[in-house]
Image: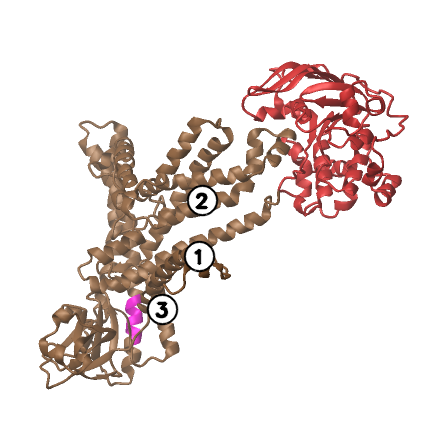
Chain colours: A brown, B red
Amino acid sequence: MTNPPPTTSTRPQPPAGETYVWVTGMGLTIGLVMILFLLGLILRNGIGVFWPRRVAEVTFREERDTRFREGLRTLGVILLEQDRDIRDLTPEQIESPDPADRREKQLFIGNRDVYGQSFAFFNAGNIAAIDYPDNVIRAERLEWGDALLFPVRLHSRDGVEILADDPAFDGTLNRLVREVGDRRREINRIERFAIGRINLQMRDLELRERFFARQDALTPEQEAEYATVRQRMAELQAEYDPLAAQAGVLRARQMEYTLDYRVISGEARSMPVGHIVHYYYPNRLNTPARVRLMAHHIWDFLSGYPREANTEGGIFPAIFGTFVMTLIMSIAVMPFGVMAAIYLREYARQGSLVRAVRIAINNLAGVPSIVFGIFGLGFFVYLVGGTIDNLFFPQALPTPTFGTGGIMWASLTLALMTVPVVIVATEEALAAVSRGVREGSLACGASKWQTIQRLVLPASAPGILTGLVLAMARGAGEVAPLMLVGVVALAPNLPIDSMFPFIHLERKFMHMGFHIYDLGFQSPDSEAAKPMVFATTLVLILLVVVLNLLAIMVRNHLRKKYAADTF
Amino acid sequence: MPPTHSRSVQGETRDMTTPPTSAIEAQRRPKVEPRSEKSKPTGNPEHIRIADYSFYYGMSQALHTIDLAIPERQATALIGPSGCGKSTLLRNINRMNDLIDGIRHEGDITIAGESIYDPFLEVISLRKRIGMVFQKSNPFPKTIYENIVYSLRVAGRNKKSELDETVETSLKAAALWEEVKDRLNQSAFSLSGGQMQRLCIARAIANRPEILLMDEPCSALDPIATGKIEDLIHELKREYTIIIVTHNMQQAARVSDRTAFLYMGKLIEYDETEKIFMDPADPQTEAYVSGRFG
């Protein structure tokens, strides 16, 4: 030490400053950075899925012995370029003066029917040139994912033939794709709704018929009804036949035109135009056209039904299922939670028992959600659902109606899980209503309930809504318990549709959280599912954000209306 | 229907030129205003009868065998230092203390001969007969109009013409009509502090009660607003039996006909206001009203 301590201590010291500002600020910064990074990643990847990127023709260096399916060239969307794993490198590549030898590019090559895979990695050092051919088409198909193709000709069964270099080719293809799209919707309408409705009625009648068939002797009235049932079934069958025939005709027309094309490796292929959902020339688009196309893709994603094990198409059923489930959950949790909170805060004698109940409620909020799922399965599905089946749907057994997972049981399970959130928030809001207002109301001759109903509840509405929002956000994002009580990867029908009784609470449903899990971890080609995972995650986050914003707006509106906090 | 009161011109002038407090500060012992008409007892001299009344919060006794009779259509002031039990007594008259756990009472309170603890009497119907104004003005988070008609609505009276008439007469009686008649549908929170307290008075009398309890109604108000409320009390006592709790002895002297002095939960002295302030019988009262303690 050069300076003896006494000397230093006698010198005036500058003020030390607030040390803990940095510590506390750092905590916040770390949290913010992580959240922003996560959101940025999801946003970039989620939006990027819809951007129509150019398709590159990659030519390999001839001297290197690189081939893709015997071809020196390949076609694909360059997704990313990254350093290769050092363990995959050969000694020559490690020594190589060209850093590109140690890097690789990932390409979306499409044409899974031809190549057996949709994505491929190529050594960046082997690439000689990248070119963007003008006439490549990216076609979204009903099967096998997207195709990257060079069109050759269109031909119909009647012998009409248009070559790709014919000026009429694009117009014709465009018109045909639009026509098959319209026809597909028509087929869907017939099969899903018209025939679906008949099937539903048939099923009920069949159950009735089975009941009669089992009886040893029928009363005259039953005989009459049995006859009616059989007659009605015949009528329905008569209705069904022409519809099925109509759908068959439409299906056949989908196959009328065929597109011949070749892929980059040279194979000539063909597919019916009826299989093309949508197509475009990715290298011919200018920026406004790309933006338009992106909007189109986003719309298809949000409004479409999933295809090919959910890896293609849209997520509309999942959005709808999440929405309906959250709605039913809110309807169930709101009155239940608010009533419990009113009793606890306003009526119950505040003592050790109420305190214990309150602690129990708070603990309930911390119970792992899977426990609620198991409870929901055991109590709602098996016990309540099973009892309902035995009492009201015995003719359908052993096929369960309510005795299996369904949207109602899932919603009720989540309601149970989120009720502590609502109770705690409501209690706080009720406690914040001033004593003066309550006493004033009682002094005016109002009863306790009138005071609660006319003054306390309106004044605490903003706080109650906050609780509901928290509950909704938690419920909408929950997956684990739902897997036990009614979520499926692919539901044939929506929980609400135009078929009587319109709201089908017993149906299984799709949910975005489970959709993400299913795509990301259960699909056969996880690489192909990745874009969908990001896009679905983005939609789920946006849905929760929108729910929150909506509730904040309602809350602020109410707060302005009942601005009682000045006292 | 009651006569509608509007503040006199003199009242207005006095408010503006000489705020009550400046006069108060000048004198230590408040002078009692000469009142010829007030001293005439006009109604039941025992409208409210508090008979050997003791009151306990849990183990602690707040009131010790209070015994006093409050005459009809007069203003009676309860004075005394903080914690002496005057608010407790007031809040027991409309059983507002029922809200508190662990309370207990002995003795009885009767209104026009009926016990307020009669098991066949609903506390709600009791409170309909008694209006109450609180220390802190407590308008409801509703419009001015809805504040006034609240007591009618909770009683199931929703006829528009009746409500409109009540709003007008109550606000006129509370000397607020001229100030708010054009904005009855605005929030009650848009009013000033003094206006809010007058709104609360209007709300308390909207239901035409017999009795008006006022728990330090002016303690949060400035002198001008206080003056207006005091004028109002003078007007209102023609119609209502008023009991006013106050810290402010000058106020008690100005507005009340009779004054009760409470100390440590006991009734020390109860007499004509003039007597209490000019010639108290008890030395403790003497000490309190002359400002030596409290």
Chain designation of label 3 = A
Q: Tell me: residue A283, above or below residue A508.
A: below
Residue type at tag 3: His
- Left or right, A333 with respect to A506, comes to right
Is residue A310 at all visible to an observer of this figure?
A: yes
User: Which residue occupies the foreground of this view, A528 or A141?
Assistant: A528
Is residue B76 at all visible to an observer of this figure?
A: no
- Give the quarter of the figure containing the N terminus of chain A: bottom left
Mark 3 → mark 1, Cα distance in angstroms: 54 Å
Query: Looking at the picture, do discs 3 and 2 lie on one chain?
Result: yes
User: Label 1, on which residue?
Assistant: A19
Q: Secondary structure at mark 3?
A: helix
User: Label 2, on which residue?
Assistant: A467
State which quadrant residue A405 falls in: top left
Q: Tell me: residue B48, above or below residue B183.
A: above
Residue bounds of the magenta highlight: A174-181
Residue type at tag 2: Gly
